[in-house]
Amino acid sequence: MIHFYIVHHELSEAIILQTYLSTTDFTNNVLIVDENALFNTPIDHPSVIICSIPSLTNNILKWLKKQHTRPLLVCSGTGNEIENIVNTQQVFAYLQTPISLERVLSLKKNIYDYAFGIAKTETAEKRDFLFIKSDYKLIKITLSEVLFFSGLKDYTQIFLKGKKTPLTTLRNLKDFESKLSTGEFVRVHRSYIVAMSQIDFISKNEITIDTYTIPIGNTYRKTLDDAIDKNS
């Protein structure tokens, strides 16, 4: 079950949204709350805060950052309001008004896919090493020595501590992503998975590991931010 909390400046719109969210075969907890009630309500996990853009305050954004397990934030508003919103890094999705049942159901599916996909990945067996094929050999790599993975179409290069030359294997990056612990490895770009413990520093759009500079893709920014929060 996913718990939905609606913060909206228009009660009639909030009731429509509540009705649409409760329509499907999923069992949900859908509550309409104001800002003060939100701060004083125990937030179950996994959960989603749907907030109309006029109701989105700095206090709500600060409150979200303080949550041990951060709820997903969805902002609803007109096209102009969505274009003009300043803070985008914390927003999981936007719901443009006027709200339709089709839009809500599509959003809901994306939320379920994300929330339970992450949960499934996080419960995967933790690994200390992997065997890979490289240069006609089966090589054991210790994951604590991995700096990052770099995807090259159907190939992946694995950069290791103290090794000038990466290992290259005929496996794609998605295959490695499914086998790595999300607490220790994070995909930060369509071509890169990094070891969190090996990061030296992070600038606005780049990560530095040893002598390497790795770009941060916009699509993966929230995943990286969540991983940073868990390690802060």
Image: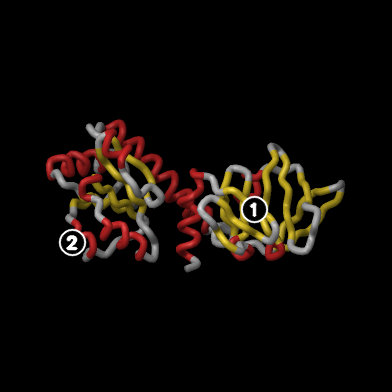
**181 w.r.t. 75: above or below:** below
**Residue lying furthest bottom:** 232
Residue occupying the point 25% across, 48% down: 51
Tell me, what colour scheme is on the image? secondary structure
Amino acid on which the number 2 mark rests in the picture? Asn
Q: Quarter-wise, where is residue 96 in the image?
A: top left
Tell me if mark 1 has few (under 14), some (14-19) or many (20+) residues whose alpha carbon lies within 10 angstroms of its own: few
Amino acid on which the number 1 mark rests in the picture? Thr
Q: What x and y, as percent, mark residue 52?
A: 23, 45
Closest to the observer, 58 or 37: 58
Q: Nearer the viewer, mark 2 or mark 1?
A: 1
**178 w.r.t. 36: above or below:** above
Closest to the observer, 60 or 181: 60
* Disc ID at residue 41: none
- The residue to which callout 1 is attached is 213
- The residue to which callout 2 is attached is 36
Closest to the observer, 48 or 199: 199
Residue occupying the point 55% across, 58% down: 202
Q: Quarter-wise, where is residue 113 in the image?
A: top left
